Image (cartoon, rainbow, N blue to C red):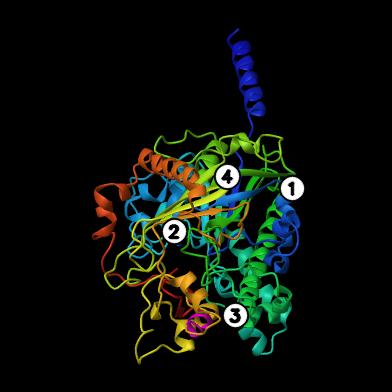
Amino acid sequence: MKRLFLLLSLLVSWQAAAAAPAKPNILFVFADDWGRYASIYAELNGKGGINDAVRTPHFDKIAKKGVLFRHAHVNAPSCTPCRSSLLSGQYFWRTGRGAILRGAVWDEKIPAYPLLLRGAGYHIGKSHKVWGPGSPSDAPYGGQRYAFQKAGGKFNNFSENVTEAVAAGQPLEAAKQELYAEVRGNFQDFLAANDGQKPFCYWFGPTNVHRTWIKGSGKALWNLDPEALKGKMPPYLPDVPEVREDLTDYFGEVAALDQGIGVLLDELEKSGQLDNTLIVISGDHGAPGFPHGKCNLYGFGTGVSLSITGPGVQGGRVVDDFVNLTDLAPTFLEAAGLPIPEVMTGRSLWPVLKSNQQGLVDASRTWVVTGRERHVESARADFSPYPQRALHTAEHLFIINFRPDRWPLGDPYRLDGTDEPTAQEITEVTRTTHPDDDAGPTKAWLVSVRNTTQWKSHYEWVYGKRPKYELYDLKKDPHETKNVADDPAYAEVKTRLEKQLMDELSRTGDLRLINDGAYYENPPLAGPVAEPAEGKKKGRGKKAAPASE
């Protein structure tokens, strides 16, 4: 009888194990400075916009297989606070010194989803950037303990390295393949390090889409024609050759990112693990060094691409639910069958992912909140932040600028004297002037024409001081060009949205509302930063990036 009971117990245990679904692997692609720019969005929203010039066949293919989100936003359009929010599943203002860029320090008491997964038996690893600049580097992912980067990191400087190789006589395609091989090698090393039994969680965080990149590389490396953008630029992007070329070069780096995605998908398929892998692809905010982009709470600054594909996901759908990337941490934890810490303000996306509906799936997901505090510490002479919070809905964008007396993208250094910076300085060094806007050709061009009759008002629109309140009617004004906050016709809308925004900030403990924001207005959240900048390495790995990473 004892033997029979033992056999029955083993049989029941075996059947239960066989019936229990395996925990899915997680492949997360999170690209620096990549907003909502993918060819599938042109297909989805109709031709005639700048996405016409983007080529992302691998992203498009995997997004069509899974769920593509129209309204995904980052919590903060600045690298470190965005990543603090994503990794913790909390609004950035709940992450202490993780809420700023320069001078950020990670609080290890904050739960971070990668380390929670590792504690539950996941094999975790990362290549390239996860959390930074900040101290310790990549702390919410365990620092560099789980780094798989021995195959190389030249992919991070794609246009620079490929251009250099071609100039030295290497064929273009061969130069590209050399960098794709790095992506493959790092991922292979990660897979090989698993004992074969653990589910895995891998973060691929390339920084090539972050400035700088080689001028003209969009056409030279990817055959992207800047003139194809003529007549398609949104109003905030000057439709001039200099800006069209700069944007095309940026899209060239997006094309390189897409090829890297293709390599990872190919390697997953070869390893036999594609079908049991949750594939999530997104970016940390909008385009760097362009009006309304990075460091702005406009849609061009906070809106990002997002697709989710894999086991349990009802694919082939496009959804209109508003998603804050804080929602990813609880989504990953629920996928692994883990409890979601009560401190997380993000909400798991699994009710949306498991649905078979198109359009708006969850009736409560009709808005998200975004914000920012300090980016470059010396953007203003007194080392102060530029505090903003915003509420995004399908109909409106409402922004509060808590310190409208300050320059939103930093002080106009050296623009009113005899020591005016050269175009080369503004193109190459972010801190030259308006330091919260990345250095680049677009910035240099716009600053250079700031006093001309044609472009003076445009320059002031981009870099000038802003009113305390901004309100945009997105149905009438999708590009957010006309502020109607003071229009009596919108008084009720403004009052309602302001209450909704302030209620959410209060509910989640935003210290910007306490004591006139003193927490963010004084050291260590404001003031000079002692430690050296942690820029990405450019060229052959020696030249630091602009300090606004």
Q: Which residue is mark 1?
A: 65
Q: Residue at x 40, y 79 (%)?
A: 433
Dot 4 amino acid type: Phe
Per the rendering, the mark at residue 161 is 3
Q: CA distance from mark 1 to mark 3?
A: 33 Å
Q: Which residue is mark 2?
A: 131
Few, some or many residues within 10 Å of mark 4 (<14, 14–19, 20+): many
Per the rendering, the mark at residue 322 is 4
Is the residue under label 3 in contact with that under label 4 (CB below 8 Å)? no
Is the residue under label 4 in contact with that under label 2 (CB below 8 Å)? no
As helix, strand or loop, the secondary structure at mark 4 comes to strand
Dot 1 amino acid type: Lys
Q: In the rendered view, would you say 379 is above or below 110? A: below
Q: CA distance from mark 2 to mark 3?
A: 24 Å
Direction from residue 436 to residue 392 in the image, left or right: right
Few, some or many residues within 10 Å of mark 3 (<14, 14–19, 20+): many
- The stretch of residues the image draws in magenta is 445-450
In the rendered image, residue 449 lying in the magenta stretch gets the answer yes
Indicate which label's residue lies in the foreground, 4 or 3.
4
As helix, strand or loop, the secondary structure at mark 2 comes to loop
Label whose residue precedes the other's in the sequence (4 or 3): 3
Q: Nearer the viewer, residue 483 or 14?
A: 483
In the rendered image, residue 149 lying in the magenta stretch gets the answer no
Few, some or many residues within 10 Å of mark 1 (<14, 14–19, 20+): some
Label whose residue precedes the other's in the sequence (2 or 4): 2
Q: CA distance from mark 4 to mark 1?
A: 20 Å
Label whose residue precedes the other's in the sequence (1 or 3): 1
Direction from residue 123 to residue 308 in the image, left or right: right
